[in-house]
Image (cartoon, coloured by chain):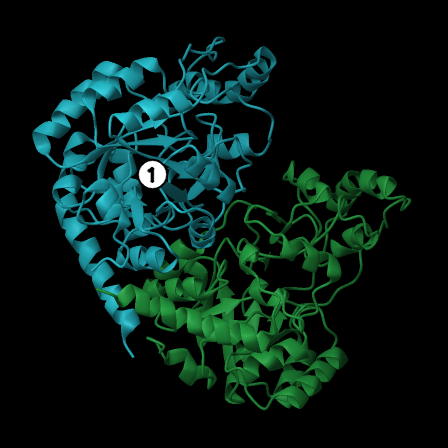
Chain colours: A cyan, B green
């Protein structure tokens, strides 16, 4: 039924539907269920230790013998300017007081680079069928080593220029991530919060600019969105939010409750929680921080200041519930059932468009 | 070839493609050409006097005997708080100095409401086939009078809630305007610059929520986008930016030059020029104003402060070149040729999706 079969061949899967890696929410149970249903399941390894990754991969291989995807963040070792830290401490202090947390910590955690030699060696040992990257691509020698090992590589673009960069770097396919997407935008450089390109505009412009297959992401939640993605020139889709309501997902109860009553206007784009732009449910903390565009600590170091606010459990003050603009369309059904529904709906949409 | 023919019946047209009204750029020559090619041409009357509207309609009727659409802005008579004016004067003064314009004017122009009794009477006299509204709908008595006169009414929604409001008010169809769209967002209330919902997410959620036909708008520029809109559940599309490069459009030379080399990342969302959020090419003035979210003078009164900056002709400092995120796909061909191409491309996309 698929009008473009390139990704089926590249990934050796039945349906060109990728479950997005969503660190913390994409469990081995969820990803394995998607794989077994003919899609490409993914695990988010961007915030995991090598031991955690080994454990997750072992769990995956208990659950499926199909190809799966491991996702990594690509960024330098983060360093925060001391003046930026001091100014940010002043801005977060009122929220610490409101939540009864005392003073914010005056140092930031040491964090390594997103993708390092340890992770490269781990991948060459674990040999997943697919590895995806977020925020860019690793160094050429790492790409060459992974490709030599027969691992298929993909990464995310939020602009045409980024897609061209990814093709030049040797990626086998590019994820075109539009404005609607929940979670972190995969932009290769920091961007203003309102600088996103909508999925409907982004996909055809990227498809025109690269030879490699394009995977549409952002706001796709049912067969209508999948059919639209193919109309726009995509060869496949990546859905994240749509899988968050599945029982196999690691979605925390508070976010599950939000998803059950979600609307298209619940979320905002903010870099005030992690240091990089992400789409998450609005919170008073993030809205207050967004009122100014003063520089913030680097990605993942900023969590050192915001994790205590989130851990306080007062969502009306501060939260980081990541989801996209189509969460209203979510279904709380097992991943295998969701996959079956997505494929059937897409076939129905294709047939409806062909009526004359 | 159209899988949903409801709008063809509602508007009495051949192809469910609306040329957006774009005040100042949508000339009678452009709109008539679209009508004659089987689409629905539109004239933007939101900033026109009654005499100007009479003249434009006479010109339209010279050019076509097909149905056409007149568009009006719906808003109260704008009033600006004196403190807001004073604070804004301080913010715009550096740009006046840079452009050698002296001091900014210390009073704002008197402007009437967007849609008043004079315009209602004018429409009942002129009897266009279709009237569309932006920023909401007029009072119930005006809607009733227009409907009694057999005029088809449509308006714009940027959220599901707005679409439901429009259906309740008696609109015959709703335009679902996504984040990608150029020009002013039709939001019924002011919104933050980053609060837009992408077209791909918005259309199916509105289609699920209303019974009236949905017209997709925002980022649609070729047959791929049109086919995608129908996949998402739309019964038609509205394209604005795509028509700006046609020779019949009133597009100024500076904007034509930008369109010829446009990318998907050229534009920003800003309310700092008109007082309402609009997608326009980035300018240093708008970016500086967006660094703060302090309140601004009311819609259309703010032009009193910004028109002199725009008229200075230094686009690198201040400009208001309105276009959307798919301008890269524009074609500088006559509107009739563009219509033919759009229909052929859409048919090809439908056929491609139906391949098995």
Is residue A282 visible in the rendered structure shown here?
Answer: no
The single residue placed furthest to the left in the displayed view is A62
Q: Is residue B87 left or right of residue B202?
A: right
Chain to which the residue tagged by mark 1 belongs? A
Q: Quadrant of the rendered structure where residue B227 is? A: bottom left
Q: Nearer the viewer, residue A77 or A155?
A: A155
Residue at 48% from the left image edge and 30% from the top image edge? A271
Residue B20, percent across and down?
A: 57, 69
Q: Is residue B147 left or right of residue B208?
A: right
**Nearest the camera: A133 or B193?**
A133
In-front residue for pair A103/A84: A84
Element under label 1?
loop
Q: Residue at x 63, y 65 (%)?
A: B245
Residue A181 lies, with reference to residue B206, above or below; the image says: above
Report the residue at 43% width, 30% height from top.
Answer: A136
> Quadrant of the image for the C terminus of chain A?
bottom left
**Relative to B239, residue B105 above or below:** above
| Residue at which label 1 appears | A172
Q: Position of residue B355 (x, y in %)?
A: 25, 66
Q: Residue at x 80, y 48 (%)?
A: B314
Q: Is residue A240 left or right of residue B274?
A: left
């Amino acid at each position: 039924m698929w009008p473009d079969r390139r990704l089926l061949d590249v990934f050796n899967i039945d349906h060109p539907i990728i479950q997005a890696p969503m660190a913390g929410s994409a469990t081995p149970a969820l990803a394995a269920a998607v794989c077994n249903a003919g899609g490409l399941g993914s695990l988010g390894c961007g915030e995991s230790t090598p031991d955690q990754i080994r454990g997750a991969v072992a769990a995956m291989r208990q659950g499926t013998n199909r190809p799966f995807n491991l996702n990594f963040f690509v960024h330098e070792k983060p360093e925060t300017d001391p003046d930026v830290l001091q100014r940010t401490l002043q801005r977060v202090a009122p929220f610490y007081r409101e939540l009864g947390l005392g003073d914010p910590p005056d140092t930031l955690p040491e964090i390594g680079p997103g993708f390092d030699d340890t992770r490269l060696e781990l991948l060459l040992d674990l040999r997943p069928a697919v590895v995806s990257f977020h925020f860019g691509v690793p160094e050429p020698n790492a790409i060459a080593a992974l490709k030599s090992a027969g691992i298929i590589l993909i990464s995310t673009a939020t602009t045409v220029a980024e897609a061209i960069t990814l093709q030049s770097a040797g990626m086998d396919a590019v994820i075109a991530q539009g404005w609607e997407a929940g979670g972190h935008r995969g932009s290769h450089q920091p961007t203003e919060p309102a600088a996103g390109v909508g999925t409907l505009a982004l996909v055809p412009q990227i498809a025109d600019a690269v030879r490699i297959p394009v995977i549409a992401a952002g706001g796709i939640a049912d067969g209508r969105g999948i059919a639209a993605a193919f109309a726009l020139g995509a060869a496949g889709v990546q859905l994240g939010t749509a899988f968050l309501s599945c029982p196999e997902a690691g979605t925390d109860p508070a976010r599950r409750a939000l998803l059950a009553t979600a609307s298209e206007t619940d979320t905002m784009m903010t870099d005030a929680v992690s240091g990089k732009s992400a789409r998450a449910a609005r919170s008073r903390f993030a809205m207050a921080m967004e009122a100014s565009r003063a520089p913030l600590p680097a990605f993942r170091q900023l969590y050192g200041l915001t994790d205590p606010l989130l851990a306080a459990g007062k969502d009306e003050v501060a939260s980081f519930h990541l989801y996209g603009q189509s969460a209203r369309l979510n279904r709380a059904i097992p991943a295998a059932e969701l996959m079956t529904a997505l494929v059937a709906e897409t076939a129905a949409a294709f047939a409806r468009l062909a009526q004359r």
